[in-house]
Image (cartoon, rainbow, N blue to C red):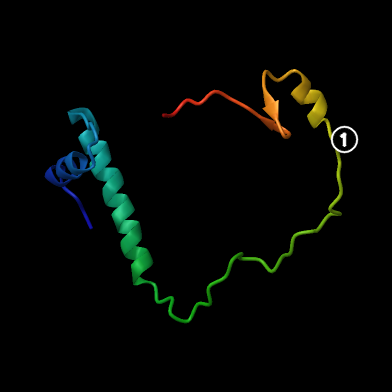
């Protein structure tokens, strides 16, 4: 699908984009190429393709679920202006 200058100006207006006159030609070409690519993808018959989460049959290595750093919460909260029950208290900013 090929777009013309008027199409791009209308799309820019609907999308509330500020496209200058100097950018209209480049934007027209870019959008036309994108729509052409979409047409090519729609032309492919993918009814027999099985959906997959990953193109390779790979699994992630699992690691031991263990603590890697010491618990320093009390040390960090000593310098906090206000804490309660292990939580940081902050001023309310939304009414």
Q: For the point 16% across and 40% down, which residue is it?
A: 9
Q: Nearer the viewer, residue 43 or 65?
A: 65
Question: Looking at the picture, does residue 42 appear above or below residue 5?
Answer: below
Query: Considering only vertical position in the picture, is 57 above or below 89?
Result: below
Name the quadrant containing residue 19.
top left
The picture places residue 54, in percent across and down from the top left corner, at 61, 64
| Structural crowding at the residue carrying mark 1, measured as other residues with C-alpha within 10 Å and reported as few (<14), some (14–19) or many (≥20) | few
- Residue that lies at the very extreme toward the left in this rendered image: 6
- 50 sits left or right of 72 in the view: left
Compared to residue 15, the image places residue 44 above or below, namely below
Q: Is residue 86 above or below residue 56?
A: above
**Does residue 53 appear to the left or right of 60 in the view shown?**
left
Report the label total.
1
In the rendered image, residue 16, in percent from the top left (x then y), is placed at 22, 37
Secondary structure, mark 1, is loop
Q: Which residue is mark 1?
A: 70
Quarter that holds the C terminus: top left
Q: Residue furthest bottom?
A: 48
**Residue 38's quadrant in the figure?**
bottom left
User: Whole-percent x and y of residue 89?
Assistant: 62, 27
**Where is residue 20 drawn, in percent x and y?**
20, 29
Query: 37 or 78, which lies in front?
Result: 78
Image quarter hosting the N terminus:
bottom left
Tell me the quarter of the picture where residue 26 sits.
top left
Rendered residue at 72%/65% (across/down): 58
């Amino acid at each position: 699908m090929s777009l013309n200058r008027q199409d791009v100006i209308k799309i820019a207006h609907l999308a509330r984009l500020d496209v200058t006159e100097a950018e209209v030609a480049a934007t027209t070409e870019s959008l036309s190429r994108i729509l052409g690519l979409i047409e090519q993808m729609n032309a492919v018959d993918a009814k027999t393709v099985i959906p997959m989460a990953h193109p390779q049959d790979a699994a992630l290595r699992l690691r031991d679920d263990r603590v890697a750093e010491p618990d320093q919460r009390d040390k960090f909260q000593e310098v906090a202006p206000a804490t309660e029950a292990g939580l940081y208290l902050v001023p309310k900013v939304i009414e």
